[in-house]
Image (tube, helix red, strand yellow):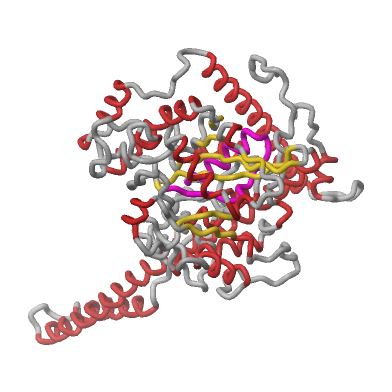
Amino acid sequence: MSEIKVDKKLAYDVLKVRQGRDLDNEVLDFMLKTLEHMKASELLYAEEGIASLCEQMDWHHTGPVDKGEVSKEVRKASKANTAPDKGSSTQLKDVAKLAYYEPIRNRLMNHGFIVSPRGTALGAVFPEKDWVDSTGVRFFDTTAKQATDALMKKYELMGDSPSALTRLLMPKKKRMEGEDPLASAVGCICVSWTRHDRNGRTFYIPVLGLSGVTEEKPNLAFFEKTCRHLGLPTSLALEPYTKRFEFKAGAEVGLASKAVQEKNTEMNRFARDSQEYLALKQEKALLDKHKKELVDADIVRRVQEQTQFDIEKVLVTNHDTMLQRTNVCAIQYRARQLLRLRQPARQALMSYVSFRESKDSKHLEAAVLQPRTTPGVDLWICYWHSFNCAEPAALSCASSYFGDGCDVEVCFPYEGLSDAGPFSNRPKETCPWCATVELGFRSVSKNPGGVDKSLESGTWLTELTLNTQSEPRKKLSPRSGFDAFDDNNVIMQSTNSTLGGGQGGGLARNKDLDEEAYGAVVKTKIGRVRSMYYMLGLMDPKIVALDRPLFPWHTPARFKFNGFQD
């Protein structure tokens, strides 16, 4: 990386422009800055990745052999910090999530997992003994669900036992009482299977992700580091919205004000106790009333127009930001191909271009559908953003550790909050954001016997959902007319069909195994965002990161890493 030369020739090659043809100076400057930023980001990723692996190796070589047990002192401190008088339930759950980071990380390393670098969401690659050599075997059509359930139980990754990963900080004699934040800090737990080629053989590698378990509360540096380890651009700035809100009062208000002023002038010609004055005063009272009605109507109209402006500002900003980020991704992706650097996974690209941490308009809600006539893109598919879930944590860890973008072929989500039963294998529905960006997932479907019967038997009906199964096999041609907000376009139809479920009565919520997993509003929102991905070229099958060589670089003998030299 340090020897890569970012120059005018590379910029021309990336844009596929022949030497001798002049590029606009602004375009050339933008290209060079983008490529320099990519180089600096990739060097920093290498430094952070190597440092993380060295830190983990040192962890294994120092102290006692078994470092996965949580001490009584840590449990006691965690309990005190999440006492009811320390804050609201939301605040206490946030505290609990941070408290779980170190114990979970240590427990996983103790079991031989490779964990994600500090400063990113907690993910972990399962030990190599759990990898599956599945050459010539239809793994996901046959044994994947059983294999994944077995891994969950083998490592006690969920459940209510004192040694369960999601209950490590709970007092051993107090389990699952009420809404204890220490019992409800870790919600979604996902096992994501990546697929790699190794010397002509196919390997499926499980990677664990945990929702929201981080060392510190996520900030801009956290998201930038996440993008860096996914091989993405790290700029998360939003495109500026230049229009300003302007309100024009109704003409009737001006006329009414003028009429009141004229009536005042007329009244001043008479004595206050005269019959003429009193008659004009009554006329003025009617004019005042009419003016107030017009002003009140204008106030209502102003609020309505301000609300609509706020909504359109956010939605148009989302649209323009998606376009700008896609442009930068395309430049860096092409440069990475030319320079033989790691390339991001497709679902990482999708999560990046549609990432929006905060919304500026209080009027935009996940449960409300944007009218088709309103310009822009609604990125509030649910009440969290595209990097928030367990699956992106696994994706980031895999991409960081394997030195290349790793798409997840199928993700298995599990429920970390509710009672998992004696078999510790309670699946959950895939969240709306994961359903938007993943290639495939296996989540819970409707179970005739309900939750109680499934808990007792350990049998949960699930369904394999593949987003790519019914979508176009080729990317959209730039010359093709495509309306991303047409509810009958090919992507919308595919999304409605896929998320509706085709087996066992359809996909369901795990809380009751009966409620539909994705309502009509959510399906439409997901379909529209996926339609944007299709329009932007992100659904090109060629950028799916499956079957990439496992460890595309050669690892030298272990050395003490002291950082890059100037």
Residue 472 part of the magenta-drawn span? no
Residue 329, compared with residue 257, is above or below; it is: above
Residue depicted at 59% across the width and 24% down the height: 53
> The C terminus appears in which quarter of the rendering?
top right
Picture coordinates of residue 167 (x, y %)? Answer: 35, 35
Q: Which residues are magenta?
A: 389-414
User: Please, is residue 219 above or below residue 428 in the view?
Assistant: above
In the rendering, at what x and y percent does residue 339 appear? 79, 38
> Is residue 154 or residue 91 the one in the foreground?
154
Q: Position of residue 349 (x, y in %)?
A: 63, 49
Q: Quadrant of residue 450?
A: bottom left
| Residue shown at the point (28%, 30%) measured from the top left | 172
Q: Is residue 311 above or below residue 290?
A: above
What residue is shown at x 68% (from left), y 20% (from top)?
564
Q: As drawn, is 554 to the left or to the right of 455?
A: right
On the question of residue 437 being in view, the answer is yes
Viewport quadrant of the N terminus: top right
